[in-house]
Image (tube, rainbow, N blue to C red):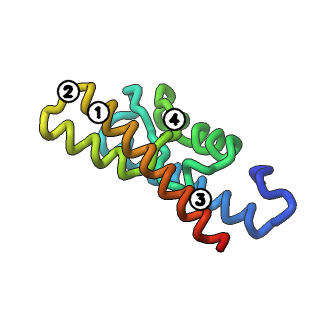
Amino acid sequence: MLGVCDEDAVAGDIVQRLAAEVVAFVRAAILRLDLADADPDVVLGGRLLRAAAPKVVEVIARGVEEVAPRARIVVSPSEPIVGAALLGLDALGADGGAHERARAELDAAVAEARSVAAVDSLG
């Protein structure tokens, strides 16, 4: 068990399977892209992986390290929509300032939306 759900064996098993699936996906991508000898960033994004306990991230990192020892595991600080917007700005050839503004404004908008949703759920 990963030790993150010691009080709930079923939840612990689900978390273990999640980590194993992420590792399998990353391994396949690294091998297909011939990046095993490179130092790729492996970005864990989306709400579930961004909220994963550090032990889960460590398990994923160890699994990835077996196939790409120099890979870096990074937990995204932002929602996936931010990455999509940044890719769009890349395609437009936008400068770094546009990227910084987009990240800041989208992160703020997501935080505000969560705050409003939390208030709405209370009443």
Residue 80 image position (x, y, % from top left): 40, 51
Q: Are marks 4 and 1 in contact (CB under 8 Å)?
A: no
Residue for badge 4: 73
Distance Cα–Cα, label 2 vs label 3: 37 Å
Distance Cα–Cα, label 1 vs label 3: 31 Å
Q: In this view, does 103 lie to the left or right of 14?
A: left
Q: What element carries label 3?
A: helix
Q: What element carries label 2?
A: loop
Eye-nearest disc, 2 or 3: 2
Q: What element carries label 1?
A: helix
Q: Are marks 2 and 1 in contact (CB under 8 Å)?
A: yes
Q: Is residue 80 left or right of residue 48?
A: left
Q: Which mark is residue 99?
A: 1
Judge by depth and name the residue closer to the eye, 52 or 81. 81
Q: Is residue 114 left or right of residue 105?
A: right
Judge by depth and name the residue closer to the eye, 38 or 54. 54
> Mark 3 belongs to which amino acid?
Leu
- Could one spot residue 91 in this view of the protein? yes
Which residue shows up at 86% across the image and 61% down it? 7
Q: Residue 18 carries which label?
A: 3
Residue 120 image position (x, y, % from top left): 58, 69
How crowded pointer 3 is (Cα within 10 Å; few <14, some 14-19, many 20+) is rated as: some
Mark 2 or mark 3: whose residue is earlier in sequence: 3
Residue for badge 2: 95
Q: How many marks?
A: 4
Distance Cα–Cα, label 2 vs label 4: 26 Å
